[in-house]
Image (cartoon, rainbow, N blue to C red):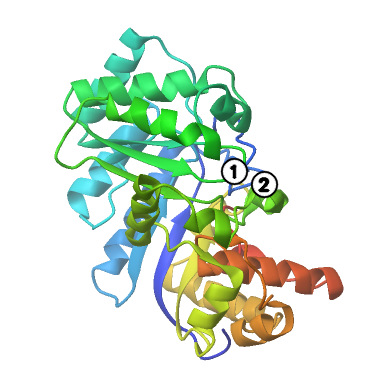
Amino acid sequence: MGKHIRFETIHIHSKLVACAHSCKYCSMGKKKIARIQPGRIHALLERFLEWETSHDMRIGYIVNYSADYDRATLEYLRDLRDRFPREYEPLRRITLGGLRKRTDEELRLWLRERQKFGCISAHGSFAGYGEVHDYWNNQRGNYDLIVRTLRIAGEIGMAILARLFVVKSTLSTLGALNDALDALPKHENDWRYAVPYSYAGWGTRLEEERIDERTRDELPSWLHTLLRKARSAEGECRSEREWIEAIRNKGNQSNGGLILNVTEHNIERLEHQTCDEIIDDLKARTLKAYAAIPDFPELCERYGDRNGTKIYGLERCLEMKWLDRHLQEHPTNFERQLTHLQLGN
């Protein structure tokens, strides 16, 4: 990417809600909570969403690491949803990662409250079955918590969505996990899929956990089906050399998105700038960040392993891996958090 990017979107991130625990594979890595009152974020988002109605740029927003919103944040998100409808609405789906522990009665009340705010599905991620999952999620009893939450969500009419992580240490437990998920309440819009860990955040430390082409090709048919279902959610499970073959004729990306990370350190400045001023500043800084690093074809040419058989779920995972190798050889000071080559803030 370079100076010819056409920015079509702006993604506004302000992480107000912390996780109760930190997963060992978390693609966000070290988390930074924004110490800001929810009302200030609501006002900033409201201003941008009103601006969007008369400009040719789409707005997206995320205000959490965990879905444990307080009541005030739920009210603010519902107000934005009702006034500025969009394809992705934060309240339509609960993600169950990072939740604090609750009893069944507490879970039912918590889910009912979110259902009243328009939630229609619950999404749980599983790094194996039972104690294997608990190990990777860094919380004893987390597997039971997610299964109980999905069961109760299903009982009150929510669709059940589940993501299975396919890595070396989870492989032997995925059959039991799949059977346990089969025992949950069923709905027409239920969805289950499988992926490897992302190369991002803490996941960059877990390359030895990646399965290879041979292991992937020998997986049971039901698990192959779940890997194929991931295509529409998170990508396609290819080896590094397969990805290189698939993207070798790809040029530089011409369309991109701006990323605005809102924190306690910049909220006051943002409140006093117009949306156009904020976006002009972001465009200039983002172009400068991309100009400081090699473009995609160059990273692929320099660092792509044309014999690599380890499996990755996203093209972007390899781009981030290749960039890390470049930065090890050529340390560079640039705002990586403004690019698509970092998750989180």
Q: Position of residue 201 (x, y in %)?
A: 64, 51
Q: With 144 as the anchor, is 205 left or right in this view?
A: right
Q: Residues within 10 Å of mark 2 (few under 14, many from 20)?
A: some
The residue at the point 67 percent across, 75 percent down is: 307
Quarter occupied by residue 239:
bottom right
- Quick one: SS at disc 2? helix
Task: Give above or below for 344 relative to 57.
Answer: above
Please name whichever residue, 196 or 45, is drawn nearer the observer in this view of the structure.
196
The residue at the point 41 percent across, 47 percent down is: 220
The residue at the point 48 percent across, 23 percent down is: 143
- Quick one: SS at disc 1? loop
Q: What type is the residue that disc 1 sits on?
A: Cys
Q: Position of residue 200 (x, y in %)?
A: 62, 55
Task: Give above or below for 206 relative to 175.
Answer: below
Please name whichever residue, 63 or 271, is drawn nearer the observer in this view of the structure.
63
Q: Measure how far apart labels 1 and 2 are at the Cα level.
A: 5 Å
Residues marked 1 and 2 touching at CB (< 8 Å) = yes
Give the label on residue 26, or none. 1
Please name whichever residue, 104 or 173, is drawn nearer the observer in this view of the structure.
173
Q: Earlier in the sequence, mark 1 or mark 2?
A: 1
Q: With 290 as the anchor, is 12 left or right in this view?
A: left
Instruction: Specify whether residue 68 is in view.
Output: no
